Amino acid sequence: MPSSKGPKIFNTRSSLPQYFPRKPTSQTICILILITLLIFGYLAISRTLLGHNCNSTQPRSVSVVWERTENSVTDASLLVNGDAKRHKVMGFIGIFTGFGSVGRRRALRQTWLPSDRHGLQRLEEATGLAFRFIIGRTNVQWKMSVLNKEVAQHDDFILLDIEEEYSKLPYKTLAFFKAAYALFDSEFYVKADDDIYLRPDRLSLLLAKERSNPQTYIGCMKKGPVFTDPKLKCFRMFSNEDVTIGSWMLAMNVNHENNHELCSSECTSTSIAVWDIPKCSGLCSPETKMGELHKKEECSGSPTVAE
């Protein structure tokens, strides 16, 4: 998985002519000691600054494409515009979003999701969870231009090489899981929407629980039972991406864990994700509702674990 060309750092080594007399005087020795101290001090500061810059400026947003041949697009070679090394986390959360959801992303960054790379790093260190917005592409140039500016400002995206269209959500979901696995060495891969109010601290505790079955599918069945009929096991695309994922999990014989705290209709001492169920599939009017929930003590101020 080759990485794209990024900025290179060149270290220049200055050549300082030095003259050593046969019989060094005390003054010469002092000068040499001073020069040595200056060199070591310069190297120490340079390494510190270079290490700091590498950690703080390395982009978190990446573009993911699949190798294209003359006749098709193959899954075999995943090309990632970024670092090829998989980043180790407990859980990777992909927040599905679209070109018309600028306001939703703004609402998330103003409430439970940090709005800059340093905040995302602190959240990851505290919870073991990494968050990125997941979006495809469009042929509308002005939309891509607006998105690129947002990426440059917040650096919290994964850009998929797939057309961003509602009818293609199952294919976007498949592309997301492929990219997520290629980029992150994670115990859990989580798909979320951009219209929910989430408590990352509680989601972290949920994922960190000890489980007898390492292959566990965690979700909230809010519209019906989980089908376990072996005849329904298949790898196919349905019109709904969540139904599609469910069929894949059934085909892989995973353990299903149904948790209604992931689809709570109001903030409680144990709620993990809040949606306006059953009126809406997420929060109704999420751009305003997100801020209203965040101001409530029971939503943002309550402890991680109920006392």
Image (cartoon, helix red, strand yellow):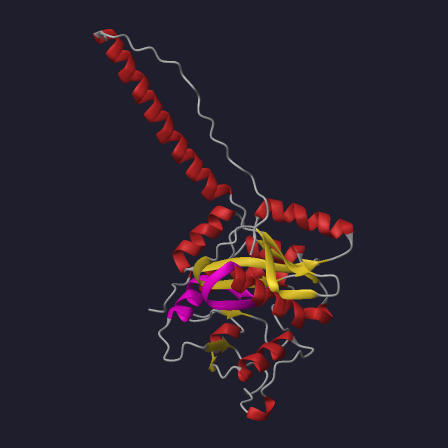
Q: Nearer the viewer, residue 63 or 225?
A: 63
- Residue at 29% x, 15% y: name it: 32
Residue 18 image position (x, y, % from top left): 35, 13
Q: Tell whether 47 sits left or right of 266.
A: left
- The single residue placed furthest to the right in the displayed view is 140
Position in image of residue 38 (x %, y %): 34, 21
Question: Which residue is situated farthest in the front direction here?
Answer: 22
Question: Residue 254: x and y, percent?
Answer: 48, 81
Q: Is residue 263 magenta?
A: no
The residue drawn where x is 22% and y is 7% is 23
Q: Which residues are magenta?
A: 183-208
Task: Name the side, left or right, on which 46 lies relative to 68.
Answer: left
- Which residue is drawn at the image coordinates 57% and 42% (left, top)? 6
Residue in the picture at 72% in, 51% down: 144
Quarter of the picture containing the C terminus is bottom left
Vertical placement of residue 216 versus 49, above or below? below
**Quadrant location of residue 14?**
top left
Pick the quarter of the image with the N terminus.
bottom right
| Nearest to the observer: residue 18 or residue 157 | 18
Identify the image quadrant of residue 30: top left
- Is residue 201 left or right of 242 when viewed as pictured? left
Can residue 44 be seen in this snapshot?
yes
